[in-house]
Image: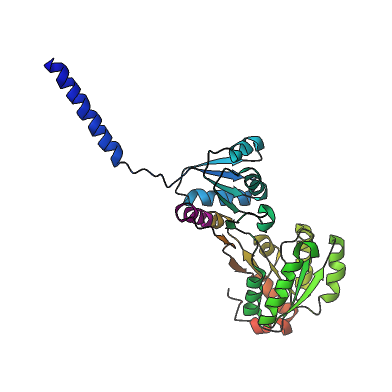
Amino acid sequence: MAKSLWRKTIWIMAFALLACLVSAIPVRADEPPIGIFLSSKIRPYIQALHGLEDELDFDYQVFDLSENYELAKHYAKSRRFQTAIAIGPEAIRLIYEFGNAIPNKFAIMALDLENLVGDHEICGIDLRIPISFEINVLGEKFGPDRKVAILYNKAENGRYVSQAIAAANHNKLQIIPVEVKDPTEIMKKLEPLLDKIDIILFIPDSVVISEKIVTHITKTALLNGVAVCGFNRFFYETGALLSFIIDYEEVGRQAARLVEKLIRQHICTFTPPKVELLWNNQAFKILLKVRPDRWHNLKGKEASK
């Protein structure tokens, strides 16, 4: 009897000790599981995912829509995740169409997020660089009285060109809108302007985005002493004088930090991406040689960048 009582006492003490140990382990109840929904495995999306994984301080599960859309859809509709991060437009549409049970949604790696999420509140990072920021940079880099041509189709980018004109007025620049409805119109409309403009500013546009078109325009512009400004590294490699570069891994890291605020503090943030400026010295030398009258005032000011 005494031995039996002693065994019971030992077991009670052991359970009590175990309970103390378990209670000493911090419970991370404020860190719900996260589902990451990836549109596909294209390089920019994978870079953003790597940035997320580097910075994210929560458990997560990744679903690739291009591998198994139905599985991703199933988990978007389930109550498995309290937070969903969507990478790319297809994933963003998925979580906003089927993820009603997910309280927190965060979207990255797509242009014009407001067009993808409808009437929902937007938490995310838009890949659209604010046109006012780009115009301000052109004013600072190239000085006043520059004529800046923007190629665009009205349905997609009419309002952004209007914003560019408003921003240019504050920077003493002149915007020359070049509206095109079809790629075949581009050179017909652009060539008569080459002796009148200083800069061609590219913005994301489905009519103008072809790499072949961009390469041809950039080379033609350089030979005519016109600077090209673009919005990714391809433009720099093609010969653009100035490129607005988005680091996609940094977008992922930035997203991870903002998702933490969304989860812990219920702060929904909608912001443009961080941008770096890349100056092309080789393109500058060509411009200076072709049209020294147009570009000599930048010599020494920008050539070393």
Quadrant, the N terminus: top left
Q: Nearer the viewer, residue 250 or 260?
A: 260
Q: Is residue 55 magenta?
A: no
Quadrant of the image occupied by residue 9: top left
Q: Main secondary structure of the magenta part?
A: helix
Q: Name the residue: 72% across, 81% down.
A: 146
Image coordinates for residue 208, horizontal then vertical, percent: 78, 61
Quadrant of the image occupied by residue 76: top right
Image coordinates for residue 59, horizontal then vertical, percent: 47, 43
Height in image: 28 above or below 70?
below
Quadrant, the C terminus: bottom right
Q: Is residue 261 magenta?
A: yes
Q: Name the residue: 80% across, 60% down.
A: 207
Is 24 on the left-hand or right-hand side of 159?
A: left
Write the start and end of the magenta stretch as one range. 253-268
Which colour assignment does the render follow?
rainbow
Is 219 on the left-hand or right-hand side of 47?
A: right
Residue 196 showing in the rendered view: yes
Image coordinates for residue 256, horizontal then vertical, percent: 50, 53
